[in-house]
Image: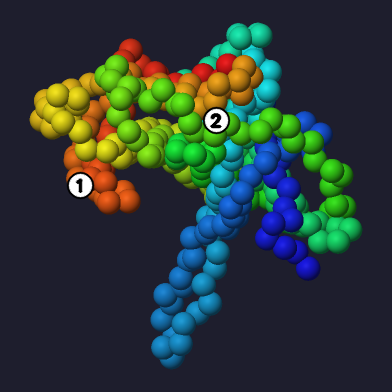
Amino acid sequence: MQTARNRVLLAKEEVTYDLDPVPTVGSNAIEASALKINFVSDLLTRDNMRDNISPVSPVVGKRYVEVTFTCELKGSGTAGTAPKIGDLLEACAFSETVDAGSSVVYAPASANKKSITLYVYDNDSASAVLHKVTGAMGSVNLKMTAGQYGMAEFTMRGNYNAVGDVALPSTPTYEDTVPPIVESAEFSLDSVSTLVVQELAINLDNEISEREDINSANGLKGFEITSREPKGTFNPEAVLIAEYNFWSDWISSAQRALSVVVGSVAGNKCTITAPKVVVESIADGDRNGILTRDIPFRLGQNTGNDELVLTFE
């Protein structure tokens, strides 16, 4: 019997697209929750005319795998050493810049985008079912809620590989850092840091395009991230116009800088910045009887490939 919680996820950056780099439990184990694998296909109907109106059995055509899961937003524990979710962020079209001993910066990329191979083991006593997903690329949704861990929700799409029974993997090695709580987060919008915000979410919203190919297995060469439309929401308590005028920002499409910091300890601190945030709409909210504003926003570039930057320090 296999249980929903007894699963192991590995992820490793590919050197060559769709070529399995063979992730290992010792180096590439990812702590994840809410892990789901969806096997997606085009079901081809056969609308042939016969001497009856009974249907002809359909055939599975183009197919791929979608894997969704959530990771804690945390660092490696050592400043200047990439966290294990770094490979996942790169597969969401982020570049990685390492400043040894200081920081690791992830910024949006438009070229030289990376892919990963995912292994998912479904454990069953002494054996396991292994799902391999190669050529995977995806998108990420960051969520920061007061008093909770920061979370990164990933959606990855990649090529299907034959599923098989394998020996149970040895004990995985995970990062031993504890995720920081979202508190004292220095949330700032247009240099205003007095807003009382319960939750901030930012969705990169990548367009993950299929590369259809008659020469490839499954009818797909793989995937490519062809565009992104990052957006987010936050929910500050209602304030006087003198403290912050959201309506002025909305009417004028003002571009405002946003930043938030998750964590405070070196090696386990993540600063998230967005240089050009535009308010999309404003709606009333109610949080424990307190009037709030529900504010969705869009992210834009400053000089390009900088609309959302994550700095681990």
Give 174 or 262, whichever is nearer the viewer: 262
The residue beneath circle 1 is 284
| Residue occupying image coordinates x 79% and y 36% | 173
- Compared across the picture, whether 304 is left or right of 45 comes to left
Q: Position of residue 80 (x, y in %)?
A: 64, 14
Question: Does residue 221 appear left or right of residue 261 in this picture?
Answer: right
Alpha-carbon span between mark 2 and mark 1: 34 Å
Indicate whether 257 appears above or below 115: above
Q: Which residue is mark 2?
A: 89
What amino acid does circle 2 point to? Answer: Leu
| Picture layout, residue 242 above or below residue 1 | above
Residue kind at label 1, given as amino acid type: Asp
The residue sitting at 50% across, 79% down in the picture is: 56
Q: Residue 238's spot in the image, x, y percent?
A: 22, 38
Please tell me in which quadrant of the rendered image residue 309 appears. Answer: top left
Residue 165 seen by the camera: no
Q: Earlier in the sequence, mark 2 or mark 1?
A: 2
- Disc 2 crowd rating (10 Å Cα; few below 14, some 14-19, many 20+) is many
